[in-house]
Amino acid sequence: MTVHYTAPYLLNPQHKITIDLVGMGGTGSRVISGLARINEGLCSMGHPGIHVRAWDDDIVTTANIGRQLFSAADIGQNKAVVLASRINRYFGYEWEAMPMFYGGQATSNILITCVDSAKARVMLGMKIEGHKRNVHEPTDRRYYWMDFGNSQKTGQCVLGTLHPVKQKRSEHHTRSSLQTVTKKFRVLTKMMGKDDDPGPSCSLAEALEKQDLFINSTLAEFGCNIIWKLFKEGMITHHGCFVNLDTLTANPIKIV
């Protein structure tokens, strides 16, 4: 069995772990709720917890209600503002809403992307992996990048490292680096010229022809569980998974 031990700073930090959550649509609107649950669990165990910045330059439309976690009262408002404000009111946090496009301009310990297209995913990967910084302050050091991607009834989440993580001695074989989504699936670069983002839907019924009702929430649960394991168990044996709602199956991505 091959394992990856969590970057030590995440387990015993002097400050809250910083997370940039990019894309507050079908998956991101679920992930931010999962992150709040993770924070509550961490704080109950004496950990400083996490601080999240939610990024999205899009506004809520009628087609978002139902598949994404928005209501009619949210229509016309920025998605990041709606969701961050909701979490802050419910849990008493001070998480930040960033109602703008994320192009890698901010750094955090963990980057989570829930973007709509292969092009956006690849361009973002090129940006952050092409400008890695070996900073001395751990609060500004990018350790992990988790990406969520899906089609109508299938999808995947992949956790990768942005810097090698020193591994402790173990009876298991260890892996200091985990492949990011753009390195693991190089076919994404071939999709950049294709229009895999068909644009906004006019209604929920039309939106469900592109992405089924529960694919986003299912992926969000699996991905948040991997992040939870990083903190709670201090190690992981899988760094992602594939989900298929047609066959009701989930296949893990082993660390190799």
Image (spheres, rainbow, N blue to C red):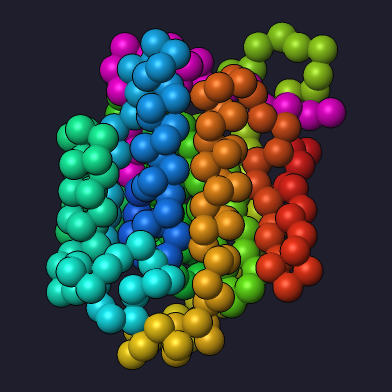
Classify 63 as above or below 19: below
Residue occupying the point 39% across, 11% down:
46
Q: Position of residue 44 (x, y in %)?
A: 40, 17
**Residue at 55% across / 48% down in the picture?**
221
Q: Quadrant of residue 131?
A: top left
- Is residue 48 part of the magenta span, yes or no? no
Q: Which residues are magenta?
A: 1-20
32 sits to left or right of 121: left
Location of residue 15 in the rendering, given as x and y in whole percent from the top left corner: 29, 17
Residue 55 seen in the figure:
yes
Residue 122 shown left or right of residue 15 in the figure: right
Quadrant hosting residue 107:
top left
Left or right: 13, with 236 as reference point: left
- Image quarter hosting the C terminus: top right
Q: Based on the displayed image, in which of its 4 quarters is residue 167 positioned?
A: top right
Q: Position of residue 92 (x, y in %)?
A: 20, 33
Q: How many marks?
A: 0
User: Horizontally, is 249 left or right of 191 in the view?
Assistant: right
Residue 23 visible? The answer is: no
Q: Is residue 242 above or below residue 61?
A: above
Q: Residue at x 37, y 57 (%)?
A: 29
